[in-house]
Amino acid sequence: MFLQMRAYRCGNMASMLRSISICCLAVFMASSLAAQAPAPAPPPPGTALALPEKVLGPLRISSGTAASNMLTAVNPVYPAEARKDRITGRVILHVIIDEQGNVTDLKVISSPDQGLTDASVHAVQQWKYKPYLLNGVATKVDTTITINFTSGH
């Protein structure tokens, strides 16, 4: 590009055309070499590509994907005190689901009330999921779960 601009400023049309030709030739040769390089052979059928979990950690999935893999869900019990005081809101939890589909690590992200938090944690710890498969291998995943509490009044 620098050569093209310089040649144009000088008014030397032959120099500009030579620069353009060199650039086009370089692009053509690079694309030809890339097209000729053999593609790597795919792994044999049934071979799983394992990702190093210690480096990457659990695979992040959306809450919708996690919900579609749910096998068993225990509904949280609305605490009587919270219901009486008409406390409503969302409890948002971050969870790790292991290779067997069990909730193994659970952290509260936000909650309007400790009673709602306790009810949510108690319920979600009992949830069971289908193992999430990555390249045919059960994989540990992390996601968020939102529990909505409404007073119904």
Image (tube, helix red, strand yellow):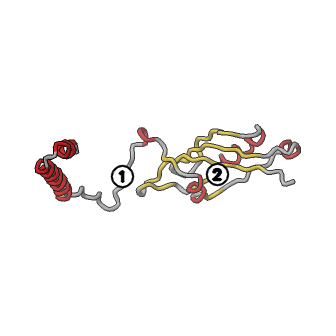
The quarter holding residue 2 reads top left
Q: Residue furthest bottom?
A: 45
Residue shown at 78% from the left, 49% from the top: 77
The quarter holding residue 70 reads bottom right
The answer to whether marks 2 and 1 mark residues whose Cβ atoms lie closer than 8 Å is: no
Q: Position of residue 76 (x, y in %)?
A: 74, 50
Q: Position of residue 130 (x, y in %)?
A: 55, 57
- Dot 1 lies on which element? loop
Q: Position of residue 123 (x, y in %)?
A: 70, 48
**In-front residue for pair 136/111:** 111
Q: Position of residue 129 (x, y in %)?
A: 58, 55
In the rendered image, the vertical position of residue 133 relative to residue 86, given as above or below: below
- Dot 2 lies on which element? loop
Mark 2 or mark 1, whichever is nearer to me: 1
Q: How many angstroms separate mark 2 from mark 1 (CA)?
A: 28 Å
For marks 2 and 1, the one nearer the N-term is 1
Instruction: Using a 10 Å C-alpha cutoff, classify the residue at mark 2 as few (fewer than 14 neighbours), some (14 to 19) or many (20 or more).
Output: some
Instruction: Using a 10 Å C-alpha cutoff, classify the residue at mark 1 as few (fewer than 14 neighbours), some (14 to 19) or many (20 or more).
Output: few
Residue beneath disc 1: 49
**In-front residue for pair 16/21:** 16
Residue beneath disc 2: 127
Disc 1 marks a residue whose amino acid type is: Leu
Quarter of the image that includes the N terminus: top left
What numbered label is drawn on residue 102?
none
Disc 2 marks a residue whose amino acid type is: Trp
Total count of labels: 2
